[in-house]
Every structure is written in structure tokens, then in C-alpha cells.
Image (cartoon, grey):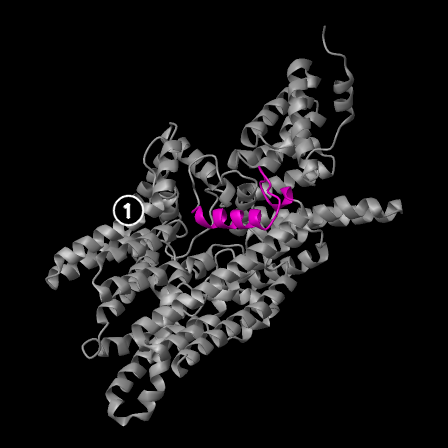
Amino acid sequence: MSPSGRSHRLGWVLLLLLAVGYRLLAHAEMSAAADTFAPIIDSEAYLVQALAVASGHDISEGVYFQAPLYPWVLGLTLRAAGVPGVVGAESTADVPPDTVARALAVGRWLNMGFGLLAVVLVTLLAQRLFGAGAGWCAGVLAALCSPFVFYEGMLLKGSLSLLFLPWAVLAAERALTTARPRVFAWSGLALGLGALVRGNLHAVTLVGAVVLLVWGWRRGRLPFAWRGAMALGFGVLIALAPVIVRNSLVSGRAVLSTAAGGTAFYLCNEPGNDTGLIQHRAINRQVPLHELEDWTALAQERTGRALSAAEVSSYWAGEALAGISRQPGTWLLAEARKFCLLFSGYEAPDNSMPSFAEPECAALRLSPVHYGLLLPLALGGAALAWLDRRRRSGGEARAALVVALLAYAASLLLFVVTSRFRLPMLPLVVVLAGACLARLPGLLRDRTQRGEGGLTAMAMLGGVLLGHAADWPVGPLTPRERASHVAVCLKNRAQVRLARGALSEADSDLYIAIALSQAAGIDAPALHVERARLARLRLVTEAPRIDVAAAREQFETSMEGTAREELARALALSADDAATLCERGLLDYALGRYADAADALQRSLALQPREREALAYRALALLYLDRDDEAGSVARQLTTLRPDDDDGWALLALALHRTGQEAPALEALDRHDQLASMREAAGIPRRFPDQPEFRTMRSKPEDP
């Protein structure tokens, strides 16, 4: 083996050791910070879908609403690792804790594998486009890139999304340097698979094909460009065909990779929203497992007819475009703010926030490789590539990288620019940053390159200034906005802690979140609702343990007073907040005030008619009030909404039994018993405890 070959192999070994070592340290710290890195919202949805795949089922019975590739890959990995699958789970509360823990561990190892593969792809791409030195510099940057590693700790598709743009550009480089247009099929395959992770990669495919044809026309190589564009489209079709066929058969009309394009466009361009960020409205619960249901229900209510999933997507896209046409100035301001956020060194959160996790994860906090460093280096690398375009070969391949990067960045402006949406373009930014870093020593030493060095320095200075773009007056990152981001993260962590019974820790998070929000001049009903929920849970779980009656009564009065005070604040902020009204109903139910509970829960359901907890407790309250017919109607709504949950069938059985409808009551009870047994067999407690009336119903002899 030649010395250069040995050095090359040694370089790869050292690079991978650095990447693995950094990740092992970070993953250990993330595992220790379990509440901060718990699967919530999107990551919880992916986990539930993956567990369904692990059990041999699809992630959804209807049209795919979320991009399906990551939960499919995760589910197959869980199955291969021997993690037991779970079908019909709505949240992690429906999954045995041991299964959640094992799935989370396996998912992080899988994400680490994606992260290491991204390091390899970035290194190879930088080597091919800019030389060996640039490759090693880019590889080190990728190995220590804190945003890469942060998303490895979350069960999110971010780590998988890193692979597709560098893969596509590598294939394009090969096609251009070997003059083999059919190699573009590999670029198409990468972009097609990427679209099953991030739907806006469809835009990159379209832009890439157009640019290729224009380049071929201008260079007199139109036949080559035409064959390349055809190969690109063929690769995309190979990747998307199974999902397109499956979705279209389910929907009854053509659907691309998902049916969420129109709703995502509306949510990111909601009429009247000039922030450039997603505003959380009461339009739907914005919980992935319920989003299609909520978007569909509201669209059907507005149109007055049944709509397919594709029609729902088209309806919301039309609503967004209509809003833009009515308020173009508002939309343009939002776009300007998105543009600022595109360059900002701030990792704008979307359910998860890297800077929030840094205090508990020193590996993330101490790594110097983040967007604020990479952007100036990348702009310097782009400037050097521009200067080298006529002096060195490979300019066309480097142009492919720039086209992919700009196309993806532009697609974000049509939707939203947050940390995990911006993440897929980061590998290409790292490649350019590595090219700059490799050239900097030479520029500093060689006086003949002062002109190039000056231009590079100006580009890097521009990157530093742009890194603060989102803090400019036109930018979206006001102190109020930043405070709200931290408050949301604290609320999310408090909900995790409430779920595992760590009430004091949850209370601390909520107290800080409210204080931080109010100090910034904002307040949110959701924070006060969570504190009210905390007080209710303490009342239910801690009061019965107090032996002295007087002390117990004093404690109950204190907890009720706290809950009432927080709910009053929430209602003062928003009188028609469904979550606040639901929590008030749950509090009244816990205190035995069933009439008040039924009324508050009904008001909540008028605003959010598909909330299962409100339906279940309203049915219970009505049963206590002997309003059995009404209870039966509510229970039927619950069984329609969640036919695989045992509590709806239990409530329906009770209501039917009390109104003398024994045969249908026994049918409902049988259904409840089957579902409850399935939950218990999976190690999950039944939702509805067994009742004396059930035992009476089961013991009755069958009619002759």
C-alpha cells in the first residue's frame, strides 16, 4: 500500500473515531436528560407509527398525511431489534414503558447511524468538489456539528433528512464528470426518497430538472441535458411509485407522497400571519395523529360536503392563496422575516429547541460547530468557488451543489424556516464551509492572493452579519418571541413530567415558564391550564393519602383554589379556549360537581368536538346525573372517534344497560372486554376500570 493510501485510510479512521466518540458522549448526556429528550408531539407520533410497523401493520389505514419513510424505517429497525410492536396506540401512554424505553434506545442508535453516514457523504462530496483538504475539513465540521447530533437524540426524521441532498449532488457530480446522463437517475432516487421525508424536496427536483435543461441549451448539450432530466425523473418515479399507487388507491384520486401539502402550506402562510413562523391556532389540535381528522372536519364543515384527503389538501391550499391575494403586504412581510430567519444563527424551534437542551448536554453546548460558525465559512467557500470557476475543472459539479442549496432554501420560504426544516440543507453548507476552511491558511500566507482573501473576508463578514438577521427590526425574533419559545419547551417538559408523576418538577417548569412569559409581556392560556391540571392531579392523588380529615380538607381547598385561579387567568386571556374549558370540566368532575362538569365539557366540545378526554368525562358525568340517553349519545361519538379504545365501549355499555337495552349493551361490553384484554396482554392498563354493573351484566343468563 502506498503512503498516500495509508494516510487516506488513517484519515477515515480518525474522522469516524471523532464522530463516534462525540456522539457517544452526547447520547449519554441526552439519555440522562430523559424528560428534555422524551418523545413528544411529532416524535411521539413517529414512535407510535413505528411500533405499528413493528407489529406488521401500516402506519395509517388511510392516505398518508405525514411523510412515511422515517416511521417505516424506524419500525422495521425496531422489528429487527426484537422490540414488540403495538397496534392502535394513540400516544406513548398506550405503550408499555419498557417498550418505549427500548424503542427510544434503538431509535437513537439508528439516528446515530444516519448521522455517521451524513459525515461520510459530506466528506466524500467535499473531496470530489474541492479536494482532499476540503474533504477532511468538512468531515471534521460534520463530525462535531451540534445540530446534527441534537436531532439524533430525538425520534424525529431530521437525521434521515441529512442524507438526500449530498447524495443527490454526489450523483450529479458523477453524471457531469463522466458525461453519463443516466447517472442522474441516482440523483432522482435520492430526491424522491427525500421527498418521503421532506415534501419540499419535490421543489428541488423540479428546479434541478429546469436548470439542467437550460444549462444544456446554453452549452449546446441539449441531448445530454434532456436524457439527464429524463433519468432524474425516472429516479424520482422509482422512489415515489409505491406510495403514489398506495395513496391513490386509498383516496380514489391521485395523491403524491402525502396529503398534507395544502394544509402545510396553509399553516405556514395563514392569512393575517406576518411573523414568518407557525402560529398555533385553535383551528386544529396540531397533534400529528389527529391533524388529518381535524383539517378534514373543518374543511367539510366549511364546504358542506364530504371531501377526500386530496380534496382537503386542495381546499386548504386554495384558502392560503386566497388569503395571500387579500393581504399581499402581510404575506410579503412574513416572507421577509422568513428570509431573515433563513440566515440566522438562531435555531428556531418547532416542538424542540437545541438551545433549550444545551444546559443539560455539555457536548452540544461546548461544540463550536453550529450554524453561526458554518454560515460565514460557507459564504467564504462560495466566494472562492466563484473565483475558481474558470481556473479549475469541476465548476459544473460545484454549480450543482449551489443549485441544490438555493432551491431547497427557496422552498423553505414557501413554507416555514425553523431549525429542523432548515436542517436538510446543512450538509451542503458544511461542504462549502470545509472548502473555505481548507483554503484559509493558504490565503493568509500567500500575499499574491490578497484579492481573493479580501473577497473571502468580505463574504465571511457578510455571513456574520446575516447570522444576526433575524434580530433585525424586520426579523421575527423579538424578545417576546424568544421568551415564548422557551416557555413552550418548559411546558412540553412539564407535560412529560406530569405523565410520569413528577409533579414538583413539573410545577417548577410551569412556574418558570409563566414568570418568563409575563416578564416578556406575554401570557398564554396553555401555561395556566397546565398549572390547573397539576393542581387537579395533586388533589386526586395526594389528598386521599392525608389521614387527618381537617388537613385533607385544607389541602383540597388549597388545590381547588389554585386550579380555579389558574383557569380564571386562562379564560381571561381567551374566553373560548377549548383546553381551558375541558380542564375546568375535569376539575368539577374530580370534585363531584357533575352538572357543572357536564356543562363545561359540553362547551369545550362545541369548540373542539373530537377531543376524546372531554367526550369520555362528559359521558361519565351524565351517567352520574342519570342522564343515560345523553351519555349513550356521547359514548357513541367516542366509539366512532376511537373504535379501538376500550373506554368508549364501556361507557356505551353502561348507558345502554341503564336504559334497558340489554342486547346491544352486552355487545358493547363484549367489545370492551376484548379491547381491555388486548391492552392488558400488552402490559398496558385498561382505560376504564371494571365496574360492578359489568359483573352483573356478564352473570345474567342468556335469553333462551
Give the residue at x 61% y 46%. 92
Residue 412 position within the rendered picture, expressed as x and y whole percent measured from the top left: 35, 57
Q: Can residue 475 be seen in this view?
A: no
Element assignment for label 1: helix
Q: In which quarter of the image is residue 138?
A: bottom left
Please give left or right for residue 137 compared with residue 395 in the image: right
- Considering every residue shown, the one lying at the far top of the view is 704
Please give left or right for residue 292 compared with residue 431 in the image: right
Please give left or right for residue 288 compared with residue 432 in the image: right
Q: Dot 1, crowdedness within 10 Å: few (<14), some or many (≥20)?
A: few
| Between 108 and 597, the one nearer to me in the picture | 108
Range of magenta residues: 67-95
Does 81 appear in magenta?
yes
Q: Can residue 291 be seen in this view?
A: yes
Residue 289 position within the rendered picture, expressed as x and y whole percent measured from the top left: 51, 42
In the rendered image, the vertical position of residue 619 relative to residue 518, given as above or below: above
Give the residue at x 45% y 42%. 283
Residue 59 position within the rendered picture, expressed as x and y whole percent measured from the top left: 49, 41
Read off the residue under disc 1.
326
